[in-house]
Amino acid sequence: MVLACYVSFAALGWFLNGFGSILPALEDDIGERASLYPLLPGAVLLVWGLIVVRRHGGIDGPSNHARGVIAGSIALAVGLVVMGITRWLAVSAIGALAASIAAAYLIRLLPAVLATIRADDTERVMMRSNAYSSVAALVAPLAVGLSIAVGTGWLPGMAIPIGIAAVAVVISARPSLADPAPVRAVEHDVEPDVEPDVEVVPPLRAWWREFTVLGVSIMIEFCFVYFAATFLHDELDLSTAVAAAGAGAWGIGMATGRFAVSTWPPPRTVLPSVVGIAIGFVMLWGVPNAAVAIAGIGVAGLGASPLYPSRLTALLARFPASPHEGSARGSLASGAALMAAPALMAGMRAVSDVRMAYLAIPVLLVVLLALANPFSHARRTASPLPSPSS
C-alpha cells in the first residue's frame, strides 16, 4: 500500500502540474473556457472538504484503503482521457470535472492511508511520497512538450503516464484487498473503538493553528509555481520558452529537498524553510540577473520542500483517533490555498505588476512564522503520531 500511495502521489503531481503545459493546446481545441480547468481541483477540494468536515466519517480498513486508491487512480486516468479525446466543450468539461474530483479524492485519501498504515513513521513516508510527486511535476511539462512536438498532441504526454500509474497502483494495492484485518468505521451511528480521553474530532481550538499554517504554506508554494515563469519573462525579459525552463528550478529544488529530508529526521519547525525561501526570494526579486534569479527559484524550492509534508503531518497528529478526519481538513486547507494563491497574485499584478505581486511572499512568510510559533512548535510535535485504534 505504501508503494501504491507513492505511485498515486506521483500521478497527482503529473496531473496538477501538467495542466499549465496543456492549456494553450487545450484552448485551441475547445476555446478559452479551458483556461478555467486548472481552478477545478482547488474548487472541488474546497467544496468537498466543507461537506466532509460537516458529515464526519471515514473507513480506515486496509481493504477499503486499497479500493479507494485503486478507484481514484483509475478515475483520474479515465477523466483525463475524456477531457482530451474530443473537441466538444460539454464532454471535455465533464472529463475535466471527473478528473478533478478523482484528484481531490486522492489528495484527501492518501495522507490518511499513510498515517494509518505507517503511524510510527508518517512524516518520513509523507516526505518521500511528495518527493516522487515533485519529480513527476518536473517531468510532466517536458513529456507534454515532447508529445506535442512529435505531432501526437498533448493527450498522450498526459494520459499515458497516468494510465501506467493506474495499472501500477492496481498491481501493488490488490494484495491488500484480501487483508483480513478488521475495518474500523467512524460514522455518526458507530461508536469508535478509541481510548476514552481521545476525541475522534477534537475541537477547533486544538487544530486551527496547524490547519492555518498548512494553508499558508501551500499558498507560498503556489505563488512560486504559478508566477515564477511570468516573473522571469516580464521582469528579466527572458523568452517564453527560457522563462518556462527557468521556472523548472522550483521543481528541482522541491524534489531534491524532499528526497534529502526523507533520509534523516524531518525538521520540527518552519524556521529553516522560512530562511531558505527568504534567501531565494531575495535572489529572485533583488538581483537583476537571470542566472541568479533562476538559482533563487531553486533555493526557494529547496527551502519550501519540507513544508507541505511536515505541516500536513502536524495536522494529522491532532486527529490520532481518526486520520481521515485530519486528512479531510488538510484537503480543505489545500483547496482554499489553491484558490487563494492565484487570486492574490493575479489581483496584485492587475493593479501593479508581477514584481510588486511577489511582495506577497515576504508577507506570507511573516504570517507563517507568527502562526507556527517556530521556537515552541518542536515541543508540541516531537513525538511520533500515536497508532490509531483498530
Image (cartoon, grey):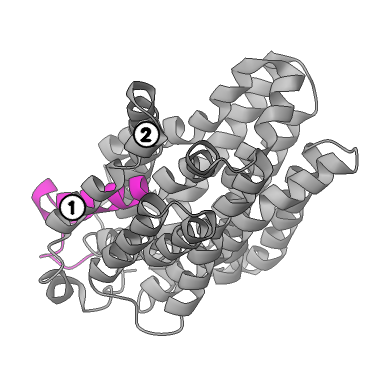
Q: Residue at x 76, y 45 (%)?
A: 145
Determine the residue positioned at 70% across, 53% down: 166
Which label was assigned to residue 345?
2
- Residue 134 image position (x, y, % from top left): 55, 60
- Per the image, the residue denoted by label 1 is 366
Indicate left or right for 78 with 146 as reference. Answer: left
Image quadrant occupied by the C terminus: bottom left
Q: Is residue 203 magenta?
A: yes
Spot occupied by residue 303 in the image (x, y as percentages of width and height): 37, 66
| Amino acid type indicated by mark 1 | Val
322 part of magenta stretch:
no
In this orientation, does residue 49 appear? no
Q: With 122 as the anchor, is 377 left or right in this view?
A: left
The region drawn magenta spans 193-220
**Residue type pointed to by label 2:** Met
Total marks placed: 2
261 w.r.t. 4: above or below = below
Q: Which one is nearer the viewer's eye here, 137 or 56?
A: 137
> Residue 48, relative to residue 375: is it above or below?
above
Q: Residues within 10 Å of mark 2 (few under 14, many from 20)?
A: many
Residue that appears at 30% across and 54% down: 326
Quarter the N terminus occupies: bottom right
Q: Is residue 366 visible?
A: yes
